[in-house]
Image: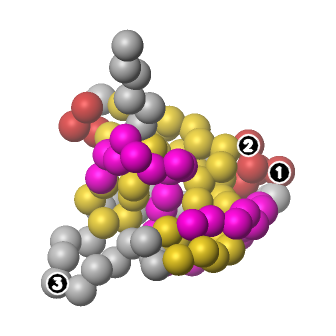
Amino acid sequence: MQEFLASSGKDIPPAVQGMALIDTGAFATAVDTAVFKRLGISAIDKIDTSTPHGPGNSDVYPASITFPALKLTDLEMERVIGCHLQWPGEKEVVLILWMVRWTQ
């Protein structure tokens, strides 16, 4: 993320805090599009997606994710899907983290 912003001549924006869901069934990590807009980060690609709302086309962004409580910092994610993650009456979720569940 830092390299991407530096090559674009942009400063590193301040962090955005919010709730995250860990989803072993997700096909990718997703961040609410409003976060990228607030930070002024432009999409680097588009991909076809399929969600509970049906098929669509989503922007792809670079991102760096930190979980301070877990002492995990600056997890570089080259391709994060931008999508709408806000549900009425729910806590503000800004991230769905794709996790691979290993089974034997």
Crowd band around label 3 with a 10 angstrom C-alpha radius: few (<14), some (14–19), many (20+)? few
Q: Quadrant of residue 60?
A: bottom right
Q: Amino acid at mark 2?
A: Glu
Of the numbered discs in the image, which one, if any, rests on residue 7? 1
Magenta stretch contains residue 42: yes
Residue 80: x percent and y percent? 59, 54
Q: Amino acid at mark 1?
A: Ser
Provide the residue span drawn in magenta: 21-50
Of the numbered discs in the image, which one, if any, rests on residue 3? 2
The answer to whether residue 17 is left or right of residue 12 is left
Magenta stretch contains residue 101: no
In terms of secondary structure, where does tag 2 sit? helix
Q: Quadrant of residue 11?
A: bottom right
Residue 68: x percent and y percent? 28, 39
Mark earlier in primary sequence (3, 2): 2
Q: Residue furthest bottom?
A: 88
In terms of secondary structure, where does tag 1 sit? helix
Q: Amino acid at mark 3?
A: Gly
- Residue named by callout 3: 89
Mark 1 and mark 3: Cα distance apart in space: 39 Å
Residue 2: x percent and y percent? 66, 45
Asked whether residue 55 appears in the rendered view, the answer is yes
Q: Residue at (75%, 66%) from the top-left corner?
A: 46
Crowd band around label 2 with a 10 angstrom C-alpha radius: few (<14), some (14–19), many (20+)? few
Asked whether disc 2 touches disc 1, contact meaning CB atoms under 8 Å apart, the reply is: yes
Figure check: 3 above or below 81 = above
